[in-house]
Image (cartoon, helix red, strand yellow):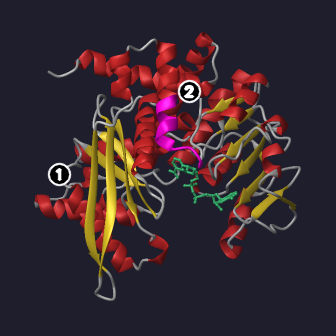
Amino acid sequence: MPQSSPVINPFETAKRQIDIVADLLKIDSGTREVLKHPKRELTVNFPVRMDDNSYRVYTGYRVQYNMARGPCKGGIRYHPQVTLDEVRALAAWMTWKCAVVNLPYGGAKGGVICDPKHMSHGELERLTRRFGSELIPFIGPEMDIPAPDVYTDSQTMAWIMDTYSQEKGYSVPGVVTGKPIAIGGSEGRGEATGRGCAYVIREAAPDVGLKLKGASIAVQGFGNAGSVAANILHDEFGANVLAVTDSQGGIYKADGLNLHGVEEHKKKTGSVVGFPGSKPLSNEEVLELKADVLIPAALENQLTSKNAGKVQAKIVAEAANGPTVPEADKVFFEKKITVLPDILANAGGVTVSYFEWAQNIQGYSWSLAEVNDRLNKVMTESYARVHAVAQERKVDNRTAAYVVAIQRVVDALRIRGFFP
Ligand code: NAD
């Protein structure tokens, strides 16, 4: 399946993916057209008062791609390079991600063209509240539930929740997820992506004849997703993490790194690099390391036609979004390397976002153990379904995941019928 690429319009890529799966599933042309169009798109231009009392006009988008299976779900990103086509593609991918793990959600995404690194806290708050107020007719717990994404965080969500609640006249915690715990955030949300990824690896391991106890792991990108996955694989499943990297470079230790020590070192120095007793390793080398499981958890387009042939892992688990380009996918399929595709392997985050919303609308909160138990069940069942379809259809897991997801959306569209 093609992934996004910086030179190709991401929405064209997303539509090509739909066509490939629609061919496999023999989906009629009318339904295919529905799948290839976002249901609703909002573009807003709005003024924000800057700290020097001048005003600047910002452009923001919210795309609700498909809501056949339930309210839309997806993040809001703040970035200078946000485009409507990027937001459309991300909204389509959220639709498939929610469907592959069987959440009762459609997909959406939002973005504001801005440079948050050069904005003050006050400017960001005013931008967020004004964008949030422009979104009020289009979002809500039953309609569309935003979450954090690139350069937005729990504070951004708190501002949107407050703005929406001020307008309604009462608190509406279920309008966004990824909130601080104090206003209805969920236990376990912070580590959900890495934890979900570790669970999917655990499920896939026996299918490639791998015992996780003592298995070797390499992680590119020791950030939120990568570090949590590494820690769980080590602490809970007995794996040995040989190498981790971050934007500064990486470290390697043949008999396994002491991850808690690495975390401490990173806190002190800002990077994993230079951890005592480790050898240096580059971000390219980590991908080709002799390890049973490779977890790309940093950037897109890391595994390409140039390096895919040198990958030695049995499992490539995509904690990051889009780390593998289509040419590399082909090589992995031929080499019988099992890829756990992003829409499955990193869906733990949106799954616990769904739990947060479910707790909010019930007015109830679950313990960390309950959240993790439910996450375990969702990830286990989702892997089993994708793996079964991959076996049945003799396709790779990525194609199988799209088949599962798109079939679920098509089933919902068909059973509801096309209005009127
Ligand atoms: P993060 O910022 O916490 O971590 C990213 C890590 O990648 C950092 O350690 C950073 O130093 C490293 N990095 C940056 N540039 C690098 C480079 N050139 N080479 C190697 N490493 C580099 O972010 P995160 O939340 O862990 O997200 C990582 C990936 O996971 C992204 O692709 C993101 O879209 C995806 N993801 C995250 C979540 C989530 O809930 N956090 C959910 C779904 C998908």
Residue 308 falls in image quadrant = top right
Disc 1 residue: CB within 8 Å of ligand 1: no
- Tag 1 secondary structure: loop
Residue placed farthest to the bottom in the image?
Answer: 52
Left or right of 73, for residue 310: right
Ligand 1 is located in which of the four quadrants? bottom right
- According to the picture, the residue beneath numbered tag 1 turns out to be 137
- Please name which of the two marks, 2 or 1, marks the residue nearer to the observer: 1
> Mark 2: which amino acid?
Tyr
> Mark 1: which amino acid?
Pro
> With respect to residue 256, does 39 lie above or below?
above
Place of residue 19 in the rendered image (x, y in percent of width and height, measured from the top left)? 48, 24
Where, quadrant-wise, is the C terminus in this rendering?
top left
Q: Residue at x 56, y 26 (%)?
A: 383
Give the magenta-colored segment's residue range.
Answer: 6-16
Place of residue 208 in the rendered image (x, y in percent of width and height, measured from the top left)? 74, 24
> With respect to residue 400, does 320 lie above or below?
below
